[in-house]
Image (cartoon, coloured by chain):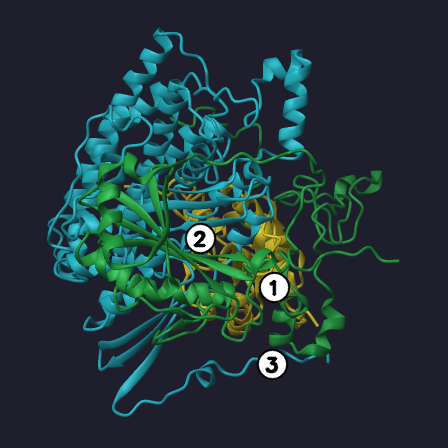
Chain colours: A yellow, B green, C cyan
Amino acid sequence: MAQHKINYTQDGGLPVALTSIDKIVNWGRSNSLWALTYGLACCGIEMMASGASRYDFDRFGTIFRASPRQADVMIVAGTLTKKHAEFIKRLYDQMTEPRWVISMGSCANTGGMFNTYATVQGADRIIPVDLYLPGCAPRPETLQYGVMLLQKKIRANKAGRAQKAKRLM
Amino acid sequence: MRAYKPKGNVQAKPYYTDRYWKAPQVAKFDVESDEVFSADLAAIKSKFDVKEAFIQVEQMTVWINPSDIYEVLEFMRDELEYTQLSEMSAIDFLEQRDEFEIFYQMLSMSKRKRIRIKYSIKNGQAVDSISKLFRCADWSEREMYDMFGIEANGHEFMKRILMPYDWQGHPLLKTYPLQGDEFAAWYEVDKIYGKEARDIIGPELRDTAQVDRYDSERFARLGHEVPKGMDPDVEENKDKTQSYQEDGGVFMIKKLDKESSKVIDDPQR
Amino acid sequence: MAQQTNRLTPFFENITFDREDNELVLNFGPQHPSAHGQLRLMLHLQQEQIVKAHPDVGYLHRGMEKMAENMIYNEFMPTTDRMDYIASSANNYGFALAVEKLVGLEVPRRAKVIRMMILEINRLMSHLFWLATTALDIGAMTVFLFAFREREYLMDIMEGYCGARLTHAAIRIGGVPLDIQDTFIAQLKAFLDKLPENIKDYEDLLDTNRIWLMRMEEVGTIDTDMALSWGCTGPMLRASGVAWDIRKEEPYELYDEVEFNVPYSDKGDNFARYRIYMEEMRESAKILYQTIDMYHECVKNNQTELMAHAPQYVSAPKLDIMTQNYSLMQHFVLVTQGMRPPVGEVYVPTESPKGELGFFINSQGGAYPYRLKLRAPSFWHTGILTDLLPGHYIPDVVSIIGTTNIVFGEVDR
């Protein structure tokens, strides 16, 4: 059984920490980024590997949710094709604000090696993207580093101010 | 004057062609050299018109008339034990002779032999559906229609399968460019945002060689992340590169200390 | 313009509801946690029972066949990785073998042994991944974590060999680019020695599990005729009573020299397929042990060649390129212009983890394939859902999709 030792004498003996609203809201937001299970192609396998036993994404508070309505961050993991483009927009619209998008892998960034008639040349033609991860496929470490950077980005924002909706156009 | 480019085949061409190069042939063997194949061919020949037959890379190719295809495959399935249709599709020879070649790859598990049935049809002609013989041809014929525009007579659901229903053009034709035509280029923008959004979203960037690694508007280098639009190579921006934790640590999270952290060298620990 | 969102109509308006009785149309996918990718199913339901199923694929169609027509043969190799991305070397191998058959290359023995090792490692990776995801869909989270743990060991071995975890491109036309690293065999042996215990762990968790049995046994039964008619191959066909394994029946590489069994069952249901995957893992381990011995033999006999000797088609070894002018010129031509195989056609099937992976190549003597058809097993394993799902209930859909083991990079290509 794990034992938690709490040092009651620190901070003047009070179990109290003082902070600003911005910080605590952003602390909560950044440390419970729930991601949408949106494995489109090969990168989706690496996304699953990040969530599995070795890389253990839960440590970052990132839990995969199947519904866009419960998700904060959409990880576009894989090739976005023209046939699918409509659905990424639908799913993005279903997510609640504030919402973030990580474009994982070359295909989602720019179309990557699939420079063909059927592939959307970058997910940012459809939805606004916050973070681009390089690689084909990016390693789970890259994805975790990306999520850390996104956390940093979230913490840099003012939480209290009304969020300006990100729009492509 | 603009250089003339033939429109019949817009696929990639080698930059250099050897005028005196004569391509060798993959060896074709006589059907007589294999007992099983010669018996099968004799059985097919007794009922149907066979134009040509030979063995190439351990498999027999049989050329037949387009109108016989259903009966030939039924005969092969029921009498000759070729119980599985592995694959079928078309090859585009429109530029050369205004024809498609259709091939059916058959497998006999009892004889461990594979036969390829082939025939050619003119452009615009339809093939006979064999989806009643082999259910898998249902999807193959739809794929063939999607990719080449060849329809199958008697197919129950002749619609596109891989491309969206409202797609225009048949991608595997040699006249269709790899990167798509005008319709393909704007397909998703038109569908989601409407034609008037074309100006705002802009054309696709198709040049794979275009890389600007100092463009922090769009991309940042790993380990050198700066806020959007900042130049990572200017001296005063060096300390603005993003690290995981801010100085002093995040509220309620202890600062990561490289000294006291343990680096695991052995991945197999 | 600023606040305009989009022109998409609500989704239900895209579906025509021309139903007569109490039929419900349920849209499943293309983003669904248990769809194994981008499968979309239109299910017509009577209460909870499916009366009509209409699988809609193509959401991952990336135009690979078109790409092949615009690429030299070696350039296409990394693209094959992204077909069945769970076991990417199996696709590399299928393509390499097809081109080798077309031009008539003889691969050196040591390269063959290494290829077999890579292929069987990929088969294990694929089967472990199948087990993990299917168990997760049915609710067995522990099996998911266990199987992914073992898969990571194999990925480490592959990473040591080729530098990539997922998309290996580890096989070249004419051989393999590298010899295996020093730690390869020790790592592989350590893994294989532990594998029986691991498989036992999974089986202890699943074999007698009441939920697992209820959702697997006598669900999704495919009889032999249906499997043959739908072009099923691999474990799907073997679970339906046909013991057909291309490694055994039409052996390629050195599969005729190794000893292994072909597990099959005549039940045809989900549980039979699950059992076959488990048994195949054991058989793969058996083959891998034998390939290790074969590799040691190659080392003993001083067979060091890794690439076929065919200056017209395959670049010379690095040492020759760096020291001999003519080899350098050949290499330059092969890289910039590409090899030009003879005029002809070839269809080469291989047994990938999912089934019969075939490459049909029509060459007109140019540096680019004139037509390349990828025969991906998953395409028809998805098609069979049309006939398989009617009569089943909604919860069965998930377990049936799971055991058909479809991968959408391969279905849509």
Q: Give the amino acid at mark 2.
A: Gly
Q: Is residue A20 left or right of residue C142?
A: right
Q: CA distance from mark 3 to mark 1?
A: 38 Å
Q: Where residue C409 is drawn, which disc sits there?
A: 2
Q: Residue at x 41, y 52 (%)?
A: C410
Q: Please name the residue that numbered disc 1 is placed on.
A: A21
Q: Is residue B181 left or right of residue B58?
A: right
Position in image of residue C319 (x %, y %): 60, 13
Q: Please name the residue that numbered disc 3 is placed on.
A: C7
Name the quadrant containing residue A157: bottom right
Q: Is residue B121 left or right of residue C348?
A: right
Q: Give the amino acid at mark 3.
A: Arg
Q: Residue at x 61, y 35 (%)?
A: B22
Within 10 Å of disc 3 (Cα), the crowding (few <14, some 14-19, many 20+) is few
Position in image of residue C371 (x %, y %): 51, 50
Within 10 Å of disc 1 (Cα), the crowding (few <14, some 14-19, many 20+) is few
Residue C198 appears in the rendering: no
- Residue C197 or B191: which is nearer the viewer? B191
Q: Chain of mark 1?
A: A
Decide: is A54 above or below C311: below
- Residue B252 or C19: which is nearer the viewer? C19
User: Mark 1 falls on what kind of element?
Assistant: helix
Among the two numbered marks 2 and 3 on one chain, the one whose residue lies closer to the N terminus? 3
Name the quadrant containing residue C126: top left
Name the quadrant containing residue B153: bottom left
- Residue C333 or A34: which is nearer the viewer? C333
Q: Chain of mark 3?
A: C
